[in-house]
Amino acid sequence: MVDHVKRAFKYRFYPTDTQAAELLRTFGCVRKVYNMALAARTEAWVLRAERVNYNATSTMLTAWKKTEELAYLNEVSSVPLQQALRHLQAAFTGFFARRAGYPRFKSRKKSRRSAEYTTSAFRFRDGRLTLAKMAEPLAIMWSRPLPGGVKPSTVTVSQDTAGRWFVSLLCEDPAVRPLPETGTVVGIDAGLEHLLTLSTGEKIANPRHERRDRARLARAQRALARKARGNGANRAKARRRVARIHARIADRRRDVLHKVTTRLVRENQTLVIEDLSVRNMLKNNTLARAISDAAWREFRSMLEYKAQWYGREVIAIDRWFPSSRLCSACGTLNGRMPLNIRTWTCGSCAMTHDRDVNAARNLKAAGLAVSACGAGVRPQRETSRTGQSAAKQEAPRREP
């Protein structure tokens, strides 16, 4: 249960030429500072076994600005540069806590272009947002209103690969409160034939957004491949055309997932899902494209944070639980069941099952057992095979 929920409200905006030039310059400086700080921290530990934290990199930044070579860092707002150092510190914290890999350098072409401003670096009055080093407010398309009487604590400006500009305002949303308890429990089986199958028997269609635009995307990619490599204008236009198609697919996918997860969280008190290892499943070359298009990882992420907002519970059942092969009527475990078998009949009770509905019902039953026994919401990854949790098998990393 959360008392004060902070939400990011994202809007598209259209900068002037002067604003675009300033923001692009800021993005470049943010990337430069991040990479230099990462290199300094890595070198200090590898060569001298010396620990470098955020305060030390902040001192380095002050010294860098005084050099002739890096004097251009003074031309942009200092706040996004300091925020880049804080993000690097957070990346190292996640690495040493085994939540993420070692921080990587930001690429000029591949990394996300963004800059974060705190309250000292922007002015927000009467729905007009003005960033530091800029004389005019941003021309924001207010597609939805901000919560009444709140002001953003941070503002993040970004540009995607399709060339679109976005501004994200982080605000406290007083409208987000725990919903009245419903007492209902639903099992949710993720699939490809249908995006989701519920224990109630309802099946939510898989929109297959990527398949709908596959031909259009292929034409754009072939046109890009014919353009000579380099910094030519024609290749840049072809690349943006491909990026716009990818952005269109991602936007529609995200819209569907938001609507589905919001409905499920509002209607059910407890939601039971399967703890799928999407990364390993993507190694299947036959199904990788379809699995990516279904976006199961994004679905789970949305479901979990919305459940936290609204006072719901999400239970993840161990991935090795045989939800598809277990008879939901009598509990008999069936033998090997390839993916092409969509219906099957139990040899013990003669009950005919829809594969996905049966799996969802078994997930619901397992979730009820977890709740009754007081087990953890997210089971340990390795217990089914080794009988030992992953936390016990791995020693923690030492922080430099």
Image (spheres, rainbow, N blue to C red):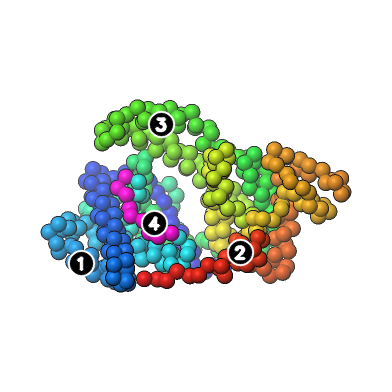
Horizontal arrangement in the rendering, residue 120 relative to residue 331 (left or right): left
Q: Counting residues from the N terminus, which is met first, the one under dot 1 or under dot 2?
A: 1
Whole-angstrom CA distance, mark 1 to mark 2, is: 45 Å
Q: Amino acid at mark 3?
A: Gln
For badge 4, the amino acid type reads Leu
In front: 70, or 140? Answer: 70
Which residue is labeled 2 in the image?
380
Q: Earlier in the sequence, mark 4 or mark 2?
A: 4
Residue 279, given in percent of the width and then of the height, sits at 53, 50
Q: Nearer the viewer, mark 3 or mark 4?
A: 3
Q: CA distance from mark 3 to mark 4?
A: 34 Å
Which residue occupies the extreme left position in the image? 68
Tag shown at residue 221: 3
Q: Is residue 363 visible?
A: yes
Dot 4 alpha-carbon crowd within 10 angstroms: few under 14, some 14 to 19, many 20 or more:
many
Q: Which mark is residue 322?
A: none
Element under disc 1? helix
- Which of discs 2 and 3 lies nearer the camera? The answer is 2
Give the Cα distance between marks 4 and 2: 36 Å
Which is nearer the eye, 32 or 390? Answer: 390
Which residue, given by chain and number where applicable, does mark 4 sit on? Answer: 169
Identity, as a three-letter code, of the amino acid under mark 1: Thr
Mark sitting earlier along the chain (3/4): 4
Question: Which residue is located at x 69 percent, y 56 percent?
Answer: 321
Range of the magenta residues?
101-109
The amino acid type, in three-letter code, at marker 2 is: Gln
Alpha carbon separation for disc pair 2 and 3:
42 Å
Disc with the residue nearer the chain's start (4 vs 1): 1
Quarter-wise, where is residue 341 in the image? Answer: top right
Above or below, 307 relative to 218: below
Q: Is residue 31 above or below residue 228?
A: below
Give the residue number, with chain letter if any, for mark 1.
Answer: 62
